[in-house]
Amino acid sequence: MINKYLRVLCIYVSCTVVLLGLAGCNTTNSTTHTKTTTNINSVNSASSQSANGLSLSLSLDSKTYLPGREVSIVIAVKNTLSIENDVSVSDNWSYSNLGLGPCDIGPGGFGYPYGIAIFQGNYTSLNFSTVTPLSLYDYSVIVPCPGPMPSTEYDFKPLSDIATVLSSASSFPNSTYAVNFELTEAGYWTGVSPGVTKHDFAPGVYTVVAGDEWGSLVLLHFTVSQDITGGNSATSLSPIGLKLSLSLDSTIYQPGQQVTIVIVETNTLSKTNIVSISNKWSYSYLTLGQCGTYLLPFGVALLQGYYSSTNISTATPATPLMFYDYNVQPCPIVLGKITTYDFKPSSDIATIQYESQPGTQPIKTNVTFSLQLTGYWTGSPPPIKKNFEPGDYTVVAGDEWGNLVVLHFTVS
């Protein structure tokens, strides 16, 4: 597990110092390694050149992935000059939460002059620092970290990522190696130790940020497509330990045939998960009927046409189909503002907590909802019911924590 982040664990017995992150071990004054930059299919790459003649590059092996598939990320620093380039250590980081593993997080981290961070969502260089990055290693595993490397200078060869790293400590010999790193991961960790849980990257967009200690910063994005299983179902996992599921009972229907849609919110953790409300809806037209979402933290929208999560906001017409009769009985009164959903371990059962008001009591319920539809309503009151016409339809489900899943069905 740790080997994904640390190339080699080298122990200098004579000085009881653990050296993490270099490509080899030796007790002589200098070690040389000729590993070259990983040859990756750079269909998604970016670079940034600094005034000191160095170029920071970031690349991915793809732009889109299926859930559970590993994402390969390569980061490298290269000398762009045709002469040797001796660059002093700077610690001039543009972002503080960059790292490659448990011993190399943020400025002063151990072993490398660069790091990365991954965020769930589509961010730019102007706003990524407003959110918390995902943890890319199991932080419940204790790793002995010796502290910052006593490096003083990187002496790069001409037009190369190979550099000799000069050390200020006699216990750390100078070392020559390729200043690049490949991280391969299929997900991230959440929770509080010892209850740490590994999650695959859920469907959606992710932002990868790479930076070096000389202030360079580059961003890339990748998308995880929906995990479609069975007849027609999709799920989306969030860092807070919840899974939003959407399913249909078929993919093809006849006009007038009932379409069954099921939405479920499940706690993926093996312990109680108390989740505060957030109102961070990814799509503004989500509902469960004329009374909105009422007590539940999710909703659905139904669009005529074939759309994806990236273009549902451009659907024509912009307003989704009205899948409920909006000229019926009044809505029940909500007794107070919901504060949290307290989910049972590995369950869709939650206790809905309210702000303390006279007469309000927590409500225990399954956080699931089912719709049975044969068509939609249109026109001014009284509305007119119409069966689904032949064609493609898009079902969108989302929760108030930003999860979003999309499915499709066809009326023949």
Image (cartoon, rainbow, N blue to C red):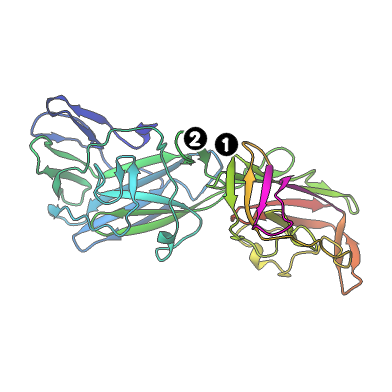
Q: Quadrant of residue 364?
A: top right
Q: Is residue 148 left or right of residue 209?
A: left
Q: Which residues are magenta?
A: 349-373
Give the main secondary structure, helix, strand or loop, of the magenta stretch: strand
Residue 263 seen in the current view: no
Question: Which sits earlier in the primary sequence, circle 1 or circle 2?
Answer: 2
Q: Is residue 64 left or right of residue 356?
A: left
Q: Residue 257 location, x and y as percent?
A: 89, 50
Q: Is residue 68 left or right of residue 141?
A: right
Residue 269 versus residue 332 in the image, above or below: above
Task: Please identify the residue farthest to the front as the structure is shown.
Answer: 358
Task: Please identify the residue farthest to the top as the structure is shown.
Answer: 13
Q: Residue 203 location, x and y as percent?
A: 58, 48
Q: Are marks 1 and 2 in contact (CB under 8 Å)?
A: yes
Q: Looking at the image, which is closer to me, 372 or 221?
A: 372
Residue 192 seen in the current view: yes
- Residue type indicated by callout 1: Lys
Magenta stretch: includes residue 356: yes
- Residue type indicated by callout 2: Gly
Q: Residue 93 location, x and y as percent?
A: 27, 57
Q: Quadrant of residue 230?
A: top right
Query: What residue would you read off at disc 1?
Result: 271
Q: Residue at x 84, y 57 (%)?
A: 390
Q: Looking at the image, which is closer to me, 56 or 243?
A: 243
Q: Label 2, secondary structure: give it.
A: loop
Q: Residue 34 location, x and y as percent?
A: 21, 37
Query: What residue would you read off at disc 2?
Result: 195
Badge number at residue 37: none
Classify mark 2: residues with Cα within 10 Å, few (<14), some (14-19) or many (20+). Answer: few
Q: Label 1, secondary structure: give it.
A: loop
Q: Residue at x 17, y 57 (%)?
A: 81
Q: Residue at x 64, y 62 (%)?
A: 283
